Image (spheres, rainbow, N blue to C red):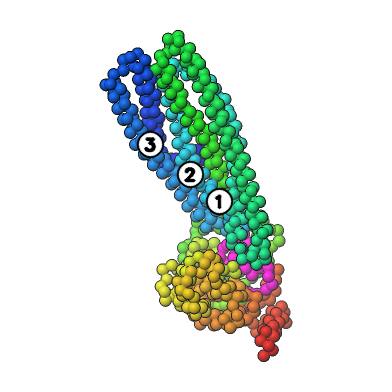
């Protein structure tokens, strides 16, 4: 029952609903005691030959009144208890979603998307069941069972009641044992479902790659194996679950046998009337539900506890990047300075950045080049505070990044990452994502700056064209330019293009860069690229290698230094010349 203690914060929050629901539920339990008593009274009247039409009508009317009352009370307790359980699911789902949005990239490196989705669906459903059906079965089994036992003992025979309850301790021990096994098995079943969920999400996202390499059969077989694993683990849960009803039925059967055997003896001895024995066995029938509910309760509670443990573990994950107490809520502006002695990714041993010192005046353009894995993207991620924990400082406007609130810092930086993500919405909605209140003209202006306006006009529905999930209907270059337009719509103080022109041709690249120079005067731009033509106009160019700066200067200065930059620039010029037939 530990899960009920864990959910104590919610029960206190919704105490009015739960208290009123429980009171109504207990009233129903009391009213259930009336029909068996009436049946016994009527049976004795018939047996004694004293039954009259008036007496029969009287008791029938009482039964009708009790039935109507129970109908109304059951309606309202369901609204109170089950309605509150739905609120719990909403609260936990909102908490999870907010938690996900605040977590750093390292969190998503450790946790798979499909697994996170399973937590927000299956696990929350199991927890909701605990707060709804779990509370119902707990209260109903205790109240109904308690009231029935009291009625049996005090209105009929305490001796017969005691005899019939002798098998009950065995039921408690067995159901407790089943519950312990069920908790472990259900936890494993939920983990298997999470893995299957993750496999499905990953395969659907990468369906193009699977088809391109002809791996459909292998992928289907992998899915079949994981699906079979889910089935097998849930069968184990079902086998344990299936032990409850037969066990309880045996216990109830023994109780019925004892009641008939000893009850008949008491009737013959004159200690009970035949009507009282009928009422007693009817009451005993009412005990079947509390006993079954008790077994069902263990099932619900153990499922809920396993799921709550999984969700709680996620919510307890520490948020790595947070605002300091002294953080200010202003849009940053000014020079950018990197003074990094060393930075190592969490869980890694080798530093990814070493001795990086850069000073970029406001309004200037910084070009960053280097081999793959040299640390270019890492520099940018540190600027937008996706990661921290470096030795040294990064200053923006003369202040450390931690002085600014995360929201304010990121409002000042328009970041276009390497992996362009588009939502399954219209082109206009994707561009306006950073500023949903933007006018149609503002959206079109951003698209023109990114040199994608003419392409959009050729789409079936123009700016209202649905791009498909993750932009599946667009080319790589079109997705890049829509992502750039999205960042430009922010009109940020700092525009960061992380190899965001790799999928466009040289002519389009030059048109975009010219547009940026003409329309972003006085604002800072940072560009990383493998194509040196994209950064040769920069005020400052740095060359990265194995996390360190090996060259620094303007294009002309680097061309006179006979280093990596000059060699790579000349090679790319030669390749471009060859592509154009030597002209």
**SS at mark 2 in the image:** helix
Which residue is identified by label 1? 118
Is 22 left, or right, of 53 in this rendering? Answer: right
| Magenta stretch holds residue 379 | yes
- Find the residue positioned furthest to the left: 54
Q: Quadrant of residue 352?
A: bottom right
Discs 1/3, front = 3
Relative to 222, is 485 above or below? below
| Magenta stretch holds residue 85 | no
Stretch in magenta: 368-393
- Find the residue positioned furthest to the top: 269
Distance (Cα) linking label 1 and label 2: 14 Å
Q: Residue 74 shows which numbered tag?
A: 3
Relative to 269, is 350 above or below? below
**SS at mark 1 in the image:** helix
Distance (Cα) linking label 3 and label 2: 19 Å
**SS at mark 3 in the image:** helix
Residue for point 37% across, 15% down: 47
Which residue is identified by label 2? 128
Marks 1 and 3 in Cβ contact (< 8 Å): no
Q: Quadrant of residue 510?
A: bottom right
Residue for point 58% across, 39% down: 238
């Amino acid at each position: 029952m530990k899960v009920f203690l864990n959910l104590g914060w919610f029960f206190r929050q919704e105490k009015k609903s739960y208290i009123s629901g429980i009171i109504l539920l207990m009233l129903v339990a009391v009213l259930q005691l009336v029909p068996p008593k009436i049946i016994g009274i009527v049976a004795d009247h018939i047996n004694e030959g004293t039954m009259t039409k008036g007496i029969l009508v009287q008791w029938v009317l009482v039964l009708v009144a009790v039935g109507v009352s129970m109908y109304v009370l059951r309606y309202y307790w369901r609204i109170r208890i089950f309605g509150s359980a739905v609120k719990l699911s909403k609260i936990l789902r909102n908490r999870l979603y907010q938690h996900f949005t605040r977590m750093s990239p390292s969190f998503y490196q450790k946790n798979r998307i499909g697994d996170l989705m399973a937590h927000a669906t299956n696990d929350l459903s199991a927890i909701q069941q605990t707060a709804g059906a779990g509370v119902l079965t707990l209260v109903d089994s205790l109240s109904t069972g308690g009231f029935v036992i009291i009625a049996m003992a005090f209105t009929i025979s305490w001796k017969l009641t005691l005899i019939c309850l002798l098998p009950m301790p065995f039921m408690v021990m067995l159901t407790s044992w089943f519950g312990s096994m069920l908790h472990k098995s259900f936890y494993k079943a939920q983990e298997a479902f999470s893995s299957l969920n993750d496999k499905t999400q990953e395969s659907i996202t990468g369906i193009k790659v699977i088809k391109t390499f002809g791996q459909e059969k292998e992928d289907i077989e992998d899915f079949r194996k994981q699906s079979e694993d889910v089935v097998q683990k849930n069968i184990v849960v079902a086998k344990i679950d299936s032990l409850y009803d037969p066990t309880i039925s045996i216990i109830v059967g023994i109780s019925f046998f004892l009641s008939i055997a000893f009850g008949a003896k008491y009737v013959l001895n004159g200690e009970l009337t035949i009507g009282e024995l009928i009422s007693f066995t009817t009451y005993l029938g009412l005990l079947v539900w509390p006993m079954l509910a008790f077994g069902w309760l263990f099932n619900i509670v153990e499922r809920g506890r396993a799921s709550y443990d999984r969700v709680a573990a996620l919510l307890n994950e520490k948020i790595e990047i947070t605002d300091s107490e002294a953080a200010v809520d202003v849009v940053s502006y000014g020079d950018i300075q990197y003074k990094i002695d060393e930075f190592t990714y969490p869980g890694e041993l080798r530093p990814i950045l070493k001795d990086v010192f850069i000073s970029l005046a406001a309004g200037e353009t910084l070009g960053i080049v280097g081999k793959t894995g040299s640390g270019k993207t890492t520099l940018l991620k540190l600027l937008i505070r996706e990661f921290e924990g470096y030795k040294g400082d990064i200053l923006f406007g003369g202040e450390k990044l931690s002085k600014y609130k995360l929201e304010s810092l990121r409002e000042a930086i328009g970041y276009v990452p390497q992996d362009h993500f588009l939502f399954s919405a219209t082109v206009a909605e994707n561009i306006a994502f950073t500023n949903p209140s933007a006018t149609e003209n503002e959206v079109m202006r951003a698209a023109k700056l990114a040199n994608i306006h003419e392409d959009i006009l050729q789409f079936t529905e123009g700016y209202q064209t649905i791009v498909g999930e993750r932009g599946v209907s667009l080319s790589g270059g079109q997705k890049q330019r829509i992502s750039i337009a999205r960042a430009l719509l922010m009109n940020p103080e700092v525009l960061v293009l992380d190899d965001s022109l790799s999928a466009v041709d040289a002519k389009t690249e030059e048109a975009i860069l010219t547009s940026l120079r003409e329309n972003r005067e006085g604002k800072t731009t940072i560009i990383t690229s493998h194509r040196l033509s994209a950064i040769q106009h920069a005020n400052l160019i740095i060359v990265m290698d194995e996390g360190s700066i090996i060259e620094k200067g303007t294009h002309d200065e680097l061309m006179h230094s006979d280093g990596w930059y000059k060699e790579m620039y000349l090679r790319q010029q030669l390749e471009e010349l060859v592509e154009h037939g030597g002209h």
